[in-house]
Amino acid sequence: MHRSSKHKVLGGVCGGIAEQLGWSPTLVRVLWLIASLLPVVGWVLYVVLWIVLPLR
């Protein structure tokens, strides 16, 4: 798994997940937005993945 440099809005995490799964980056961003409504899960996980995942 990696961060996307092509489908990047903030850190490229959602774009990288979308590329890995073969999904639309917009769909992954919408799902991430829904997940981030849960306490702590969305934003903390995004920041952790942004730091841990290498840029493609």
Image (cartoon, rainbow, N blue to C red):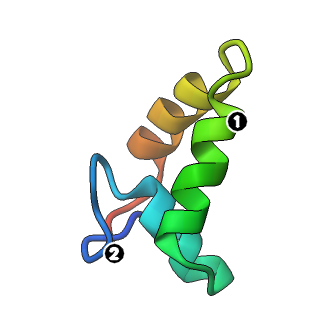
Expressed as whole percent of the image width and height from the top left, the position of residue 39 reads 71, 12
Residue 26 horizontal side relative to residue 3, left or right: right
Type of amino acid under label 2: Arg
Q: Residue at x 59, y 65 (%)?
A: 27
Expressed as whole percent of the image width and height from the top left, the position of residue 41 reads 69, 24
On residue 35, the disc is 1
**Above/below status of 32 relative to 24:** above
Q: Residues within 10 Å of mark 2 (few under 14, many from 20)?
A: few
Q: Residue at x 40, y 63 (%)?
A: 3
Whether residue 1 is visible? no
On residue 56, the disc is 2
Mark 2: secondary structure: loop
On residue 47, the disc is none
Indicate the quadrant where residue 21 lies.
bottom right
Q: Residue at x 45, y 32 (%)?
A: 47
Type of amino acid under label 1: Ala
**Above/below status of 39 relative to 41:** above
Expressed as whole percent of the image width and height from the top left, the position of residue 1 reads 57, 69
Residue 39 horizontal side relative to residue 22, left or right: right
**Above/below status of 43 relative to 12:** above
Mark 1: secondary structure: helix
Expressed as whole percent of the image width and height from the top left, the position of residue 4 reads 36, 70
Mark closer to the chain start, 1 or 2? 1
